[in-house]
Amino acid sequence: MALGKAVYRIVATGSGKGKTSLGVGLVKELSARGYKVAVVKHASKGLDVEGKDTRRYAEAGARIIVASSPSETMIMLPEGMEDPDLLAPLIPSSIFIVLVEGFRHSKRGKKIIVAEEPGELEELRCSPRDTLLVVSDNPEVIGRAEEKGCAASRPEDIEAIAGRIAGDAVEEALKMLPGADCGYCGYPTCRMFAEHVAKGEKTLADCPLITGVEVVVDGVRVPLNPYVRSVFRSMARALVSTLKGVPENPRSIVIRVEESGEKRGG
């Protein structure tokens, strides 16, 4: 998944294991706590749009179809994508937590393993290195997970599971920040800023130390301190946001000013 996201893959050895129920419960709980959450779901049997207008457009050769109504918007890409990384550009930068259901063979993010039998932990390669949590009703599974050094919980403990995700998301955001505690972002510490990033109230790009702002005058790069970089970024975003056709959260803004060819100076 794209840089700048905390990704959690809910995986199991097959369908009917409770992945979707767990995911829906987590989205409800995290949303109630004020976190913005994106979901990427793997549909192994295809999407149920057969006979619908969107399918007709796809069969006609459209490369992308956007279906919108007063209540929802759907984007359909006729070409399947087995790598969740390819879907990352569709997720706004303001959403930091991404729950991925399925894609068990992907190596992105941390796994939340849903298991019914101890042997499933071996098949899903349960390891504290990349497993955030094991979720199961089976005491044997929980015991085996703890033997492997992995935390475990029961499916009904949604509040605890959501709390673990929220806490880990803050740590993930903190890893992506410089750790300078400079205060230029408006918060006294990087950890406090990371808490707001995890909730989607701020983005990593709001950190002045990692914001890519460059000013070049007559071919010479002008050094900018973090505060000035932050001011330039805010001004540029404010200006372009008033223009038609500009996306809500642009990834890059380039403004080039060419002076006239008239002689300058005395």
Image (spheres, rainbow, N blue to C red):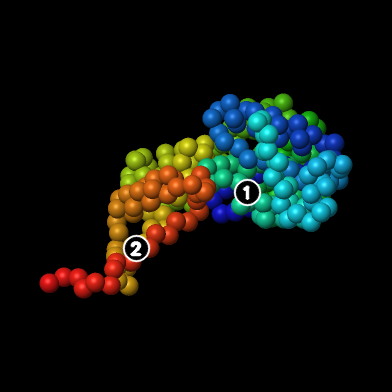
Q: Which residue is found at the position 52% from the left and 36% from the top?
A: 199
For marks 2 and 1, give the one nearer the viewer: 2
Residue 118 appears anywhere in the view: no
Where is residue 37 drawn, in percent x and y? 61, 37
Q: Is residue 2 left or right of residue 214?
A: right
How many marks the image carries: the answer is 2
Q: Amino acid at mark 2?
A: Val
Q: Which residue is found at the position 68% from the left and 38% from the top?
A: 68
State how far apart marks 2 and 1 are (Cα): 31 Å
Q: Earlier in the sequence, mark 2 or mark 1?
A: 1
Q: Is residue 217 left or right of residue 14?
A: left
* Crowding at mark 1 (Cα within 10 Å: few <14, some 14-19, many 20+): few
User: In the image shown, does 117 or 222 lie closer to the viewer?
Assistant: 222
Residue 212 appears anywhere in the view: yes
Q: Which residue is found at the position 57% from the left and 48% from the top?
A: 5
Q: Which residue is found at the position 73% from the left and 30% from the top?
A: 155
Q: Amino acid at mark 1?
A: Leu
Q: Is residue 161 left or right of residue 101?
A: left
Where is residue 139 drawn, in percent x and y? 78, 32
Where is residue 56 drawn, in percent x and y? 83, 47
Q: Which mark is residue 90?
A: 1
Location of the C terminus (image quadrant): bottom left
For mark 2, what is the residue?
Answer: 257
Where is residue 209 drawn, in percent x and y? 38, 54
User: In the image shown, does 232 or 194 lie closer to the viewer?
Assistant: 232
Q: Is residue 129 left or right of residue 121?
A: left
User: In the image shown, does 4 or 51 lie closer to the viewer?
Assistant: 51
* Crowding at mark 2 (Cα within 10 Å: few <14, some 14-19, many 20+): few
Provide the secondary structure element on which disc 1 rests: helix
